[in-house]
Image (tube, coloured by chain):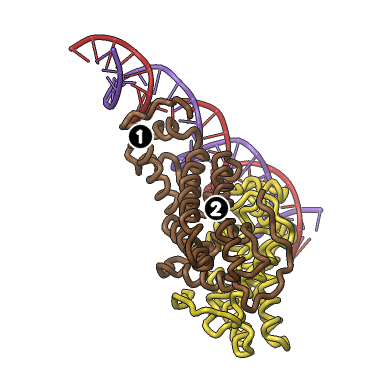
Chain colours: A brown, B yellow, C purple, D red
Amino acid sequence: MSPVRPLRVDAARNRELLLAAAEDEFAERGISASVADIARRAGVAKGTVFRHFATKEDLIASIVVGHLATLTSVARRQADAPDPGAALLEFLTVAADQRQQHDLTFLQSASEDDARVTAVRDELLACLGVLVDRARDAGAIRSDVTVADVFLLMCAPVHVIENLSDPTPGLWKRYLAIIFDGLRPEGANPLPQPAPSLP
Amino acid sequence: MSPVRPLRVDAARNRELLLAAAEDEFAERGISASVADIARRAGVAKGTVFRHFATKEDLIASIVVGHLATLTSVARRQADAPDPGAALLEFLTVAADQRQQHDLTFLQSASEDDARVTAVRDELLACLGVLVDRARDAGAIRSDVTVADVFLLMCAPVHVIENLSDPTPGLWKRYLAIIFDGLRPEGANPLPQPAPSLP
DNA sequence: TACCAAGTTGACCGAGTGGTCATCTTGTTT
DNA sequence: AAACAAGATGACCACTCGGTCAACTTGGTA
């Protein structure tokens, strides 16, 4: 592709340290965590942050890209699992678990018009679409549910409990179970609104 | 109760203007809306904000108290409706609708250790508990779902779509329908975690 | 109408923000 | 080992924030 020369080893290490520190700091302090604190946590000076990431928004987008890419690979791995319903549930479980650990749901909206983010998100949607279609064909989920629905609901179990002061670890599984039961065909009532089309 | 002398008429008017302006401003700009902008929108000086509300957090708590009180009265009104299942669904519809209009879900966590907020929240939990118990006894919702579950899930339909750039009005109804189907007894699978106890 | 407490104002403060840049350090290459 | 570009540094900048307060207005009251 592009003949970019590789990063110097110390620079590459600092970049990883910064990403990890930023994830932790955002998880603890929310979106308003400061660049200075992130730099301190990574053990570098503030200027180094801006050498690796043009702006704070760019740093956030980089984190989100990493998370979405992980989810994409999870979806791809489940694409030919024998039980399509179990495959979709497994994907949603991993998705919620990843988000639970670092509580990064809010970062996504903060970087929704970043080109890299939308690209990897579209890739995830494509892979997730395969899982949803297979689950629907197998009768594991109701026929009127779309990929967009699943993508939007993906974040819900963690969102539901994120206002709790000290939630039981794994409590999100309870709400994933309830929501997934709502996606099942048994006893499904007709949905009042057409499914959204993700941009 | 307390023999507090009533507010002067202009002060009372400014207080209402401030609360309304703050709701709008928070809805548009999120939690980081500035006190100065809120004052400008209300047509008063910044100092006036702090005469009515000790801190920005206090202002937020006042808004949240108002919302929770409204929900409490809605729950109370549904307490003796003929169809307990429909009554609970109606409450959740009003709750989501109220939140949809001003997108205030995030304000709740910002004021969770305010005494007034917890007081009115506990009152809401009590009234909502009546609705949930009646719905469960009538077989309208599954037996393993508690008030805490419903309270936590109450915000979910709006949360689900709040990352969309321009959601269809009423799209939240789609996700309320899915989630409510997940609360129904038909085809319910056992829940993997015990229900949380709200503090 | 005259008075005064209640209410309003906006300049001001210190703390903290994201971002810059001249200067210094260091990994890499020859 | 010499040389240099890539990278790291932290003082610095302009700006915004929540919050304060002395000076000024104004609504209620006797």
Residue at the disc numbered 1: A12
Residue B133 in picture, x, y percent from top left: 59, 86
B82 relative position to A21: left or right = right
Residue at point 58%, 51% (across, down):
A126
Inspect the image, locate mark 2, and give the three-letter code of the amino acid beneath it.
Answer: Cys
Q: Chain of mark 2?
A: A
For numbered disc 1, what is the local secondary structure? helix
For numbered disc 2, what is the local secondary structure? helix
Residue B60 in picture, x, y percent from top left: 59, 59
Residues A131 and D10: in front is A131
Q: Residues within 10 Å of mark 1 (few under 14, many from 20)?
A: few
Residue at mark 1 shares a chain with residue at mark 2? yes
A96 relative position to A179: left or right = left
Residue D1 in picture, x, y percent from top left: 18, 12
Mark nearer the N terminus (1 vs 2): 1
Inspect the image, locate mark 1, and give the three-letter code of the amino acid beneath it.
Answer: Ala
What's the CA distance linking mark 1 and mark 2? Answer: 30 Å
The image quarter containing residue D28 is bottom right
Asked if residue B113 can be seen in this view, the reply is no
Residue at point 61%, 53% (across, down):
B163
Residue at point 56%, 56% (across, down):
A128
Residues A40 and C14: in front is A40
Asked if residue A101 can be seen in this view, the reply is yes
Residue at the disc numbered 2: A127
Residue B85 in picture, x, y percent from top left: 67, 83
The image quarter containing residue B1 is bottom right
